Image (cartoon, rainbow, N blue to C red):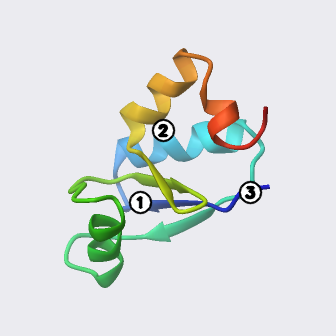
């Protein structure tokens, strides 16, 4: 299984939605709390190549993007493969 990480912020509805989608896929993932102004948020920004919003999702170090990106991959039938399920 690939390493899956998602940077989130408390109270963020997009983060909740993205985490729910990952849980629905029954994959193991690490949720990293990254509120504004924290080192974790800066790390998400740097790793994503400048993504300023959360969530930011990574699979084996590759950025899949935020909630909209995950939902788009799911609609296209490509999320399972991106998560190493297919």
Locate the N terminus and report the quarter of the image it occupies: bottom right
- Residue 62 image label: none
* Label 2 vs 3, first from the N-terminus: 2
> Dot 3 surroundings within 10 Å: few (below 14), some, or many (20 or more)?
some
> Dot 1 surroundings within 10 Å: few (below 14), some, or many (20 or more)?
many
Q: Which residue is mark 3?
A: 28
Which type of secondary structure does the marked residue at label 2 adopt?
Answer: helix
Q: Residue at x 60, y 25 (%)?
A: 78
Question: Which residue appears farthest toward the bottom when viewing the image?
Answer: 39
Marks 2 and 3: which is nearer the front? Answer: 3
Going by the image, does 47 lie left or right of 71?
left
Q: Residue at x 59, y 36 (%)?
A: 21
Could you tell me residue 6's position as x and y percent?
50, 58
Which type of secondary structure does the marked residue at label 1 adopt?
Answer: strand
Could you tell me residue 40's position as x and y percent?
36, 77
Q: Which residue is mark 1?
A: 8
Q: Residue at x 75, y 49 (%)?
A: 27
Question: Which residue appears farthest toward the top when viewing the image?
Answer: 76
Residue 54 figure quarter: bottom left
Q: Which residue is mark 2?
A: 17
Could you tell me residue 2's position as x and y percent?
72, 57
Going by the image, does 50 lie left or right of 83?
left
């Amino acid at each position: 299984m690939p390493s899956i990480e998602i940077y989130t912020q408390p109270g963020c509805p997009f983060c909740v939605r993205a985490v729910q989608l990952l849980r629905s896929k029954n994959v193991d993932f690490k949720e990293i709390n990254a509120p504004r102004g924290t080192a974790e948020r800066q790390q998400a920004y740097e790793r994503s190549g400048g993504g300023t919003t959360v969530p930011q999702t990574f699979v084996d170090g590759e950025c899949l993007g935020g909630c909209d990106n995950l939902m788009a991959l799911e609609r296209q039938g490509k999320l399972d493969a991106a998560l190493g399920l297919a």
